[in-house]
Amino acid sequence: MNVSVIVTVMNEGEAIRPLLESLIQQSRFPDEVVICDGGSTDNTLAVLAEYEQWLPLRLLISSGANISQGRNQAIAAAAGPIIAATDAGVSLSPYWLEDLVRPIEAGETAVASGWFEPDPYTDFEVVMGSTVLPTRQDVDPKKFLPSSRSVAFLKSAWEAVGGYPEWLDFSEDLIFDLALREKYGEFPFVDTAVAYFRPRGSLRAFFHQYYLYARGDGKADLWRKRHAIRYVTYLIGLPAILWLIWREKIWGWLLIIIGVGAYSRRPAQRVWNNTWGWRPPARVRAFALIPIIRLIGDIAKMLGYPVGLWWRWRKRERTED
């Protein structure tokens, strides 16, 4: 069965080269690579043109398209019955495509979930990846919802669930995953089909990323309970502890230390494993960054989520009118 790899791009420039190079090195060569460009104004198109002699590239130009629209257009234009989706900012393991589509080609499933790993370039990115990204041991394969940087499905399955939700600009792959799971059940988890990507390189970029993710959650009405727990923790629990610090300093500080330790425990284990061999001062700085990263991520989510909810309520009002 023919396999079409689909990608959306927007002002990727030189950053798209690792993906293209890794596609060239695949043990199972893609029958076509359909790329939808959302209107790049840099040298992205020129870089893509360089690889036309090595890859079966098909380029679509759709200025102003969001990620969902770009993916849907690329899939609609794809000739293969099997679609493998990935992102521009990744590098793929050599057996990514072969392993990812194997259960689909065998007729075992309509959808197969790949995996992703951080590909840090700096010490800060090592800590960032360790803090916010799970390891294979952290996820339940039966419940894991794949990122669209590493997932494969039948084109007919994409059609059956109505494609990616074009009204959503972030968290769109989760909505797509949930629709596929509702129709087809559990996905095989192919953890050897790995897409490597670079974590955010600054706290500002991380804040912006998580703000957009949470805004997408609000638009899509995802993870109500998780967001509610976060608001209760910071708006009720934290002020209560601060009051206790003011009244009973020892017990208040003890609760803060226990809470931060519990909240940072699993990221700290990952940082411990990923910084083995670092000198002590660098390692101390790494561990000190964990609660800061988590705090900034939580603030970004608490700011982004209500913006998404407001958008959803406004959309509902317009629909009812």
Image (cartoon, rainbow, N blue to C red):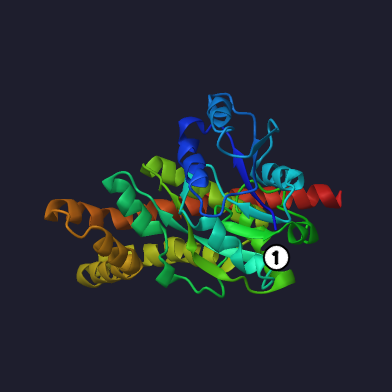
Which quarter of the rendered picture does the N terminus lie within? bottom right
Residue 256 sits above or below residue 89 on the image: below
Q: Residue at point 37% right, 67% down?
A: 240
Question: Residue 53: which quarter of the image?
Answer: top right
Q: Residue at point 42% right, 46% down?
A: 206
The answer to which of 306 and 213 lies nearer the viewer is 213
In the image, farthest residue toward the left: 280
The amino acid type of the residue labelled 1 equals Leu
Q: Is residue 249 visible?
A: yes
Label 1's element?
Answer: helix
The answer to which of 232 and 63 lies nearer the viewer is 63
Q: Position of residue 269 (x, y in %)?
A: 29, 67
Question: Residue 99: which quarter of the image?
Answer: bottom right
Residue 255 sits above or below residue 29 on the image: below
Q: Position of residue 89 (x, y in %)?
A: 49, 43
Question: Residue 48: which quarter of the image?
Answer: top right
Q: Residue at point 58% right, 39% down?
A: 55
Q: Is residue 72 left or right of residue 321?
A: left
Residue 54 sits above or below residue 120 on the image: above
The answer to which of 288 and 276 lies nearer the viewer is 276
Q: Is residue 119 left or right of residue 224?
A: left
Q: How many marks?
A: 1
The answer to which of 287 and 79 lies nearer the viewer is 79
Q: Is residue 214 left or right of residue 180?
A: left
Residue holding disc 1: 180
Q: Position of residue 25 (x, y in %)?
A: 48, 47
Q: Position of residue 174 (x, y in %)?
A: 62, 59
